């Protein structure tokens, strides 16, 4: 066992808890209270000041309805600290359930959100490089919506009445020039997990070791189900990350952003967004090189031509 491997698995566990906590719209204090822990305990686990325990993993998985994801992360952490297990440190970037078990590096991650006044169209393009020794046959994506950030009870009630559906998402995906088939992994009112498969009814096209490929997927969410925020979580080693938001100019949009890492609370983005107006559309762009693994970048906006009453 190495301290580096132990720390890596602990960080991965903390990132998984943070992800599901945000999906459920819970603050660290609220989750700690539901688990019966001291209000600061979840914050200590997510920051790495406390190592996770089996009881914590079990309670967090149950309360967050994570479908076993938090427990699996705990199992990996427990295995890394077992005195009877002395594996060699895995080659960068290590085990990655997001890529079907193979090692992927994201050379370029470009995310675009376009709002036409009634719906948001999200388009994600990633250049993937397989650094492992096994072919990659699938890639995991997550779609999470929250109409009322910071108001979990209100959001949960909203999505129980108005669940996000596959038909309205109109999810499409491709790898190079090939259409990708997809399979749902988790299907909840405000959250979807989907395996994008490197295959279609006509052929299979796995990403072999040493190869690179562009993948692209896109989906649509109506304005009454989205919420005015867009977050990018760095779950794989990434060399360049770019986010672009486009809004109708007549809405007079203003955009700002924050960054959260494993060791720090939300802070303003280290660099400013760029803003250009082009043919009735305001485009905001932000990018960074070599973002920290497990970091989360959140962009938020408002439309100055609307009143609070117009966006309840």
Image (spheres, rainbow, N blue to C red):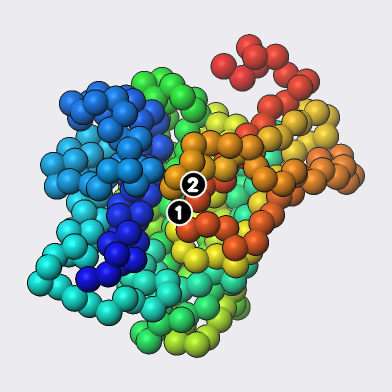
Q: Is residue 14 above or below residue 41?
A: below
- Residue at the location (49% across, 36% down)? 265
Count of marks, rendered view: 2
Say which residue label 2 marks: 261
Say which residue label 1 marks: 294
In x, y percent, where is residue 289? 65, 61
Quarter of the figure that contains the N terminus = bottom left
Mark found first going from the N terminus, 1 or 2: 2
- Residue at the location (38% across, 28% down)? 27
- Answer whether labels 1 and 2 touch (C-beta < 8 Å): yes
- Residue at the location (32% across, 59% down)? 7
Q: Is residue 125 left or right of residue 88?
A: right
**Residue 243 seen anywhere in this rendered image of the structure:** yes
Q: Secondary structure at mark 1?
A: loop
In x, y percent, where is residue 286? 71, 50
37 vs 171, nearest the viewer: 37
Q: Is residue 312 left or right of residue 294?
A: right
Q: Is residue 117 left or right of residue 142?
A: right
Q: Residue 69, labelled with which disc?
A: none
**Residue 161 seen anywhere in this rendered image of the structure:** no
In x, y percent, where is residue 83? 12, 68
Q: Secondary structure at mark 2?
A: loop
């Amino acid at each position: 066992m190495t301290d580096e491997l132990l720390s890596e698995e602990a960080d991965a566990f903390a990132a998984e808890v943070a992800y599901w906590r945000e999906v459920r719209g819970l603050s660290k204090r609220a989750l700690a209270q539901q688990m019966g822990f001291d209000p600061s305990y979840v914050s200590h686990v997510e920051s790495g000041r406390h190592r996770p325990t089996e009881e914590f993993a079990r309670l967090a998985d149950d309360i967050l309805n994570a479908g076993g994801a938090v427990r699996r992360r705990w199992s990996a952490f427990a295995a890394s600290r077992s005195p009877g297990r002395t594996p060699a440190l895995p080659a960068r970037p290590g085990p990655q359930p997001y890529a079907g078990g193979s090692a992927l590096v994201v050379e370029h991650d470009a995310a675009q959100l376009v709002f036409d006044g009634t719906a948001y169209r999200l388009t994600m393009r990633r250049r993937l490089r397989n650094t492992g020794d096994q072919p990659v046959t699938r890639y995991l994506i997550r779609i999470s919506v929250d109409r009322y950030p910071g108001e979990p009870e209100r959001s949960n009630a909203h999505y129980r009445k108005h669940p996000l559906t596959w038909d309205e998402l109109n999810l499409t995906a491709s790898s190079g020039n090939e259409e990708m088939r997809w399979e749902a992994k988790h299907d909840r009112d405000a959250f979807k997990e989907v395996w994008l498969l490197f295959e279609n009814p006509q052929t299979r096209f796995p990403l072999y070791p040493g190869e690179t490929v562009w993948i692209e997927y896109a989906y649509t969410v109506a304005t009454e189900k989205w919420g005015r925020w867009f977050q990018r979580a760095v779950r794989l080693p990434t060399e360049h990350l770019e986010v672009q938001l486009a809004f109708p100019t007549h809405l007079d949009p203003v955009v700002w952003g924050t960054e959260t890492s494993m060791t720090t609370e939300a802070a303003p983005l280290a660099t400013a967004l760029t803003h250009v107006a082009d043919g009735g559309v305001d485009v905001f762009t932000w990018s960074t090189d070599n973002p920290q693994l497990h970091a989360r970048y959140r962009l938020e906006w408002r439309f100055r031509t609307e009143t609070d009453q117009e966006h309840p």
